[in-house]
Amino acid sequence: MKITVTGASGLLGSSVARALVAGGHEVTTLQRRPSSVAGVHDVIGSVTDPSSVAEALTGTEAVVHLAAKVSMMGDPSEFEAVNIGGTRTLVDAAVAAGVQRLIHISSPSVAHTGDSIIGEGAGPASPELAHGEYARTKAAGELIALDADSEDFKVLVLRPHLMWGPGDTQLTERVIDRARAGRMPVLGSGAPLVDALFVDNAVEAIVAAVDAVASTHGESLVVTNGQPRPIGELMSRIAIAGGAGVPKLRVPVGPALAAGSVVEKLWDLGEHDDEPPLTRFLAEQLSTAHWFDQRRTQEVLWWKPRVSIEEGLALLAAHYAK
Amino acid sequence: MRFPARPAQAPPKLPEWDPAWSRIVEAKTPDGPHSFHVLDTLEVLRAEGLEPSGTILALHGNPTWSYLWRHLAQATVDAARSGGRVWRLIAPDQLDMGFSERLAHESLPTPHGAEVRRMSQRIDDFDAVVTSLLAEVTGSSAPNDAAASAEHPIVTIGHDWGGVLSLGWAARNTDLVSASISLNTAVHQPEDAPIPAPLRATLAGPMLPTATVVTDGFLRVTMSLGDLDPEIKDAFRSPYANASQRHGIGGFVADIPVNENHPSYSELQRVGADIAAYEHPALLVRGPKDPVFLERYLRDLRQRLPQADVHRFELGSHLVSEDYDVAGVVTDWLNTLFPVDDAGAIAASGTSAAENTTAAAPARGVTAILDARHDDESIASVDFAQNPAQQITWRHLWHVTTSIAGGLLELGVRPGDRVSMLVPPGNNLTAALYACLKIGAVAVVADAGLGPKGMTRATTSADPQWIIGELPGLGLARAFNWPGRRISVSPLGPVQAKLFKVETSLTALSRTTHHAQLPTPAATDDAVILFTSGSTGPAKGVRYTHGDISALAAVLTRVFDVHEGTGLVAGFPPFALLGPAIGATSVTPDMSVTKPKTLTASAISDAIIAGHSTMVFASPAAYKNVAATASDLDEEQKAACARVELVLSAGAPVPLDLMDSIAEVFPNASIHSPYGMTEGLLLTDIDRAGVTAAAATSNLGVCVGRPIDGVELALAPIDDSGASADVLEQGTAAQGRLGEFVVSAAHIKSGYDNLWATTAASARDDLDGRTWHRTNDIGHIDAEGRVWLEGRLQHVVTTPRGPVGPGGLEALIDSDEQVSRSSIVGIGPTGTQSLVAVLDAEGTYLSPGLAPLDLTSRLRELVAEVLGHDLTAVLVAPTFPTDIRHNSKIDRSRLATWADHVLSGGSVRTKV
């Protein structure tokens, strides 16, 4: 099949592109930097630019749309341009070009209002209720993608939850770095259950979705390892696998939420290279349960996570031992 | 104060209320046409093409309205949609009540005033409304004959004073009505009993209008009797927003005939008499936590309707249908009574539980052997609970029981009367019990482990006419105002007798001259009702008939070779009572019944010596102490223990190490550990060799062996939602899968007392035409047919990988040296739960919160390896809540609530 992958310069995008190539597909990628994936046709450009999108979609049958502005912080207009505008541009171009399938990669935060999520399925994306610019704009983008779903243009939305593993800079490396520096906090008891997704499983779920969308489309699926863990335990094990000690910085939940909020505001004003140490969004994530019912996901995708959390931790430890 | 007239209205939008149920009906009552608001499901049913094939006529009480029947409306419509009988529900609001017409009144209501709509008028009102509505459906107004009523049965249901009115109407329309149901109600105010306190206050002359009409006090108090959500309370109160709408509430109270001068007194007498003549099937549902409709009203109603099935929701209040799924009980009862596609419905009904276990009639009655040995001078019973130990011969036992039986009859005890036994095991209990069995009086035995509150609840629900007790028991009965005339064991002095309201004593009764002829109970008559402390909810009374007891005695003879002349030490209460039925010499050892750990090796050996015993029955806790105190035995005692041929341990499984310890005390005995429960005391059996063999396998759970001779065991597989299947499996199809054990045998219970729905649910299977009992115990059967217990049905964890029984996993986790004890709980929605192990911090170095990483890893690997399941988390709880008595019974639901709280971000310091 001829498949276009957007955002193939990141860990997930490049891994998906690589897996699709390995699966015998003809893969075109669209991103701002070279993808460095062997065997793909790189189109350098942005999803916000109609001409590069049109170029990347030429003759393609399926699109895996990963390109997004992923960050805890930032200028609202930037999020909107990429996550909403970019998705709109891509969807319009895909429909015009006669593309038949779209796998839109979203985030569970699009339906997360800050309350605990305990064994629920994927709720509807809600730009009004989602917390933060990222979640709000991803929610709007997801709705654009789902709105375009039809028998001729089959759309399936995947929402990978808390992806981690070797090479992941978003979560894994930050946890390890902060644990090394003694700045990785454990909020409260560290007991709230969270779902996470090992990177290899995320890749395989997306590849599975390219096939699955032919029979089931027009819905959103949260993708996780199906192994909820206490957040404190998971973070500790990631830190240990990365060669850092067990996080010892214990923060009561109340102050953490307040501190997160203050920090978020401060960082919003200035220009910084690094992410803030703890945003309210993250504090919420770390102090409330959020784990999901995976039965529908596994049924639709005809997929099961191959690498267990325990195996993933061993792989992570091996990666950092090198 | 004047009250203007106002026609009936439709209710506003209300929660759980379908506006399509509402209709306004003009009915011609004897004093002219009036408009009624009526809940009627006809329109909703017909809109879906469903034509009624049965009608339920419902009547609310005071101060509710037809909103009370919304759950029944929904349940019947849902059942009709899914292919069941199409029941139409007609539930009028009474005049001056709910959204029905408000009559004009010149003044506030008073008991003798003219402004009150009287009981007889209200029955006429009901008649007028339902007669006109029944005529709308062909088949539902035809006079009753067997065929017509099966085609379109008409059933009444009422609550509170609506119960009396609807029963009264039904009793006067027996040609139309096929069955009747009543929730908390009262027909008759006994002359000698005071009016319930809350009503007394309201009825006190000038208070009446103030409490009921001028203010909404009565309304508010009634709505506070259950645990209602605020919006539901508001809905109930919506037709009574101001005083001008509340005349009916006061009028209703004013019409309660508190004495014979009251205008409605004679009508209530007539209604009561009519109800007593009513012979159609009846169901009485009761929530006992009702300050007005007390137990005596249920007793009165049961005397008028002896055919009635009863279902008590022990923790239910006056508004019992708000507290519990009464609609479910009602529809189940109606389905049993009026099955779809069964023209002979009426004839086939009412034979549910009674005919079960007596198909193969037992060879002899419970007291047959005792009677046969009336001249036998050998020892029947030795009682070490008395000091000095008391032994009695068969002749003496026969004589005493026959005298007491006659004395009880002379006192007024009738066959079928219930006698609460507050006597610890020993000769006195044996004498009292067998005296009752001789005349068909039913012994009610409540486990002292229930505590005063539990025993009071149990005794109140069994409603005995008599109590036979020793002093501590009689003190309880007095303190908690238990029903029943009192008989002491030993004679009391006049002061004590008066204090405890004791009329006579067993000692006095035992001097009664023998009666030539005693009544002979049938095998199907109730013999005993046993209340034992269960793991969930209030204790249930388990009913055993004479046939069941005979069958149980026969099992002991057939399976364990307990026969006439055998000497047995009875350290386990249920079996202590069976000696005379078998003809075995039973010895009650010196121990406290409620504390099995007080049985010492010396005490058991002395009991063995006294009864020349070859068999010993006790519980694992007792044997544990016997083994621990074995070093105290002298040579004679050791020799006595060495003579024992059979050691039976009942009440809980016996681990291998305890089996080995028991074997050291009783070197020549075969050691058996049967599995059972109050509802079926002996179901499977395993001996020491069996436990050894089972321990060598890798099965999860506790092996309790194979079914004994006469017991059929089947498995109801558990599905992904944790429910056990309706279809039973046996043989290889039942092996290797998690399920609920379902048993059938002649010696299982006949039913639960006053729990119609619970009985029906537990005996719902009909495989091979047998009567079965759902045990609620879960586990699996291995390829060799051995039964393995893995916990209770309500504790099954439903993970996305399938259901998990907690028992097996806990045993596995407890084997880790860092763990003292554990509980497996499920967190999250059914079918996708997370499997969580909660460990007890007590007696370990673990601190509350997340367990240490290395321990968590170890347990997770163990669970993955043995079960292939993912152990989500390991938590350490500061304390383990347990059942007060059974220290081993962990309160899993409380632990699950705590774990759920902690795993959603709550503090680990939250109280478990």
Image (cartoon, coloured by chain):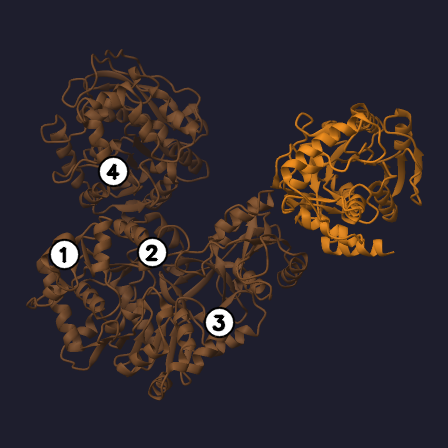
Which chain's colour is orange?
A
Which chain's colour is brown?
B
Q: Image check: B158 left or right of A195?
A: left
From the image, tell me which residue sits under label 3.
B655
From the image, tell me which residue sits under label 1.
B496
Q: Secondary structure at mark 2?
A: helix
Q: Amino acid at mark 4?
A: Phe
Give the quadrant of the N terminus of chain B. Answer: top left
- A318 or B160: nearer the eye? A318
Q: Residue at x 16, y 34 (%)?
A: B271
| Distance from the alpha carbon under mark 2 to that under mark 1 | 26 Å
| Distance from the alpha carbon under mark 1 to that under mark 4 | 32 Å
Q: Image check: B292 left or right of B257?
A: right
Residue A158 drawn above or below residue B60? below
| Distance from the alpha carbon under mark 2 to that under mark 4 | 25 Å
Q: Amino acid at mark 3?
A: Pro
From the image, tell me which residue sits under label 4.
B293
Closer to the N terminus: mark 3 or mark 1?
1
Q: Chain of mark 3?
A: B
